[in-house]
Image (cartoon, grey):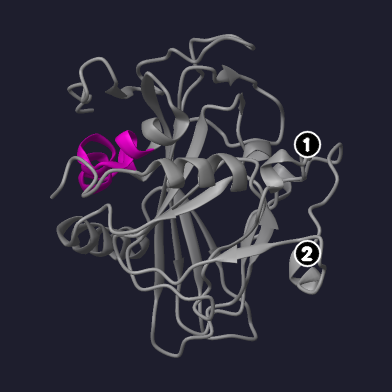
């Protein structure tokens, strides 16, 4: 399994990430990682371990499953955090001197799942502020728009918007009344002021996005293809702790205070440093 990306991220790809808020990077995770993590994802879903959100609707046979903080429960997800090229990819996109792990999240949509991924952006879910924050969504199965591939709005990370968080099961714990709801951009596909971006993916491809890039996904209309995505999030040098309400519940109370750099090695371990290329990662 590769510890470094299979190929270098180009200057053009870095510009795309900066200007569009999202970039698709092809084949940076090898087949061994994809097979290992696909098996781990299915096993994890079936185990019932961790904090899961399962959306089962009475009008469908499919299921939309997601969970977070898997690496705190499962050695395969811990290995992916510590040993995969994900942290180096994040550091390269952010231009960061070092990278700390924030959290991982699993998304599985079974065939014929009607439930969409509601339009949103990530930062309103997170107790952080800053530019050095990134989500890396790794395809573990083939993904198309028809099988619920992610769709983005180009440049939306520069809108200055902060939309109300919404989870697949519409958990009221995130329903911040101080923020405006995110529009359903599926209803604005013909709006000439918006440019929609989407990609067909193979296992090992990844989509990397700024946490204010607005995105969503439709149903999984496939009759046979399960869609599995593993998202891992990192922060870099300018991140600050912002313990606002209606955000992701941390596994423990951090040692940092509001407005401080989150230098908590237990909750947010350093997984990559530019000075030594690959810091020896924490093992627990």
Mark 2 vs 1, N-terminal side:
1
Do tag 2 and tag 1 residues touch (Cβ < 8 Å)?
A: no
Task: Please tell me in which quadrant of the rendered image residue 183 appears.
Answer: bottom right
Residue 184, numbered label: 2
Residue at 46%, 82% (x, y): give it.
111
* In this rendering, position of residue 87 left or right of residue 158: left
Q: Which residue is mark 1?
A: 160
- Magenta residues span 71-89
Residue at 53%, 81% (x, y): give it.
146
Membership of 82 in magenta stretch: yes
Distance from Cα at disc 2 to Cα at disc 1: 18 Å
Task: Please tell me in which quadrant of the rendered image residue 157 appears.
Answer: top right
Viewer-proximal residue, 46 or 219? 219
Where does the image place residue 106, in percent across and percent down from the top left?
Answer: 42, 55
Is residue 251 placed above or below 181 in the rendered structure? Answer: above
* In this rendering, position of residue 53 left or right of residue 178: left
Where does the image place residue 190, in percent across and percent down from the top left?
Answer: 80, 74
Is residue 139 placed above or below 83 in the rendered structure? Answer: below
Where does the image place residue 279, in percent across and percent down from the top left?
Answer: 21, 21
* In this rendering, position of residue 189 left or right of residue 204: right
Q: The residue tagged with tag 2: helix, strand or loop?
A: loop
Is residue 15 placed above or below 28 in the rendered structure? Answer: above
Q: Quadrant of the C terminus?
A: top left
Viewer-proximal residue, 156 or 253? 156
């Amino acid at each position: 399994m590769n510890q470094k990306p299979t190929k270098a991220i180009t200057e053009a790809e870095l510009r795309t990430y900066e200007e569009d808020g999202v970039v698709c990077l092809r084949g940076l995770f090898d087949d061994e990682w994809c097979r290992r993590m696909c098996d781990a994802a299915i096993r994890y879903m079936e185990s019932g371990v961790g904090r899961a959100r399962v959306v089962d609707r009475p009008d469908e046979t499919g299921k939309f499953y997601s969970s977070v903080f898997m690496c705190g429960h499962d050695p395969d997800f811990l290995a992916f955090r510590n040993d995969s090229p994900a942290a180096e990819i994040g550091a390269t996109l952010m231009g960061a001197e070092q990278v700390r792990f924030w959290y991982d999240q699993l998304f599985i949509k079974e065939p014929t799942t009607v439930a969409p991924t509601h339009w949103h952006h990530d930062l309103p879910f997170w107790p952080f502020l800053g530019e050095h924050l990134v989500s890396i969504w790794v395809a573990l199965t083939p993904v198309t728009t028809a099988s619920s591939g992610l769709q983005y709005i180009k440049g939306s990370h520069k809108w200055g918007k902060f939309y109300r968080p919404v989870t697949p099961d519409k958990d009221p714990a995130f329903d911040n009344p101080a923020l405006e709801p995110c529009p359903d951009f599926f209803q604005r596909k013909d709006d000439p002021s918006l440019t929609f971006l989407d990609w067909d993916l193979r296992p090992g491809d990844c989509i990397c996005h700024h946490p204010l890039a607005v995105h969503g996904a439709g149903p999984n209309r496939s009759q046979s293809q399960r869609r599995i995505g593993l998202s891992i999030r990192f922060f870099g040098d300018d991140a600050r702790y912002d313990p606002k309400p209606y955000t992701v519940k941390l596994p423990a109370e951090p040692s940092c205070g509001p407005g401080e750099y989150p230098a908590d090695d237990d909750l947010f371990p350093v997984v990559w440093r530019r000075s030594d290329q690959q810091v020896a990662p924490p093992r627990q």
